[in-house]
Image (cartoon, helix red, strand yellow):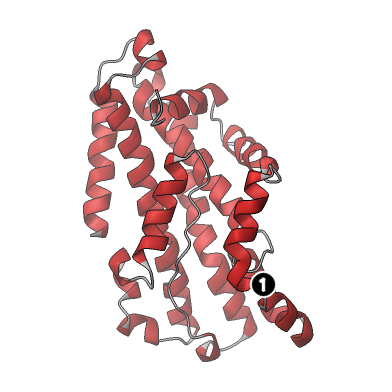
Amino acid sequence: MFYALLAGFAASCVAGFLLPVTAADLAQPPVAVRAAALGIVILGTLVAVSLHEWAHAAVAYRGGDTSVAGKGYLTLDFRRYSDPLLSIGMPVLFLLLGALPLPGGAVWINQGALRSRWWRTAVSLAGSAMNLLVGLLAALVVGSGVLGREHPVLTGALAYLALIMFGVAILNLLPIPGLDGYGALEPHLPRGVQRALGSLRPFGLWIILGLMLLGFFGFIWTAASFLTQLLGVDPRWIGVGAVLASVRG
């Protein structure tokens, strides 16, 4: 399944590279252009989600939790995740709504099997590190200028994908119960604090959604945009990608 996602992403990139596009198409994208851009962004995001969850499991395996192998988490097949609907369906829904595609479900790690609290921290950080890596690769391709202006669909979609990946990583690293940022910090907190904050974990997703709706996470887009520009991505390409990959209009 992972290789099918990867093949679909590659095919979308080829289509984005080959499609002839006029200036008018960038303002009012025809179906083929929109489909290629959506394929790059959505399938690229799903590939990143699979890699995110696999990274958690791979580091956990190295850290002592060998049960992840028996659960199939090391196969990169998202159908093995604890909840494919939350791990895959939720990110796609968020993405189509114009929000950050944060996964809800995740691989189940036996924290007690890990050799130390530092391994618990490493397991939590591994997923966001994978998002940063995907974003870095996409940004470097665009920032290098190798695609030029002759392939605006591929350039714009990859620029937008890089922005999304950086945004997801930044959001996921916030110290909110239920996010990887808190998971990395939790092993080093006093027991009493762990118990108090742990009681909020079931409500973590609702806290995040509430803060998003109230506009408290605007800095995430700003920080993600700063990272893409730092890597040489022209913000205008991000705008192009956002228009092409939009499901509205």
Say which amino acid is labelled 1: Leu
- Residue shown at 33% from the left, 10% from the top: 22
The answer to whether residue 86 is visible is yes
Does residue 144 show up?
A: no
> Residue beneath label 1, please?
200
- The correct choice, above or below, for 232 with respect to 54 in the image is above
User: The C terminus appears in which quarter of the rendering?
Assistant: top left
Q: Position of residue 48 (x, y in %)?
A: 41, 53
User: SS at mark 1?
Assistant: loop
Q: Residues within 10 Å of mark 1 (few under 14, many from 20)?
A: some
**Residue 133 location (% of width, % of height):** 48, 52
Q: Which quadrant would the N terminus be assigned to in this image?
A: bottom left
Q: Nearer the viewer, residue 97 or 187?
A: 97
- Residue 155 lies left or right of residue 132; in this view the side is left
96 or 142, which is in the foreground? 96
Q: Nearer the viewer, residue 133 or 40?
A: 40
Left or right of 7 in this view: 239: right
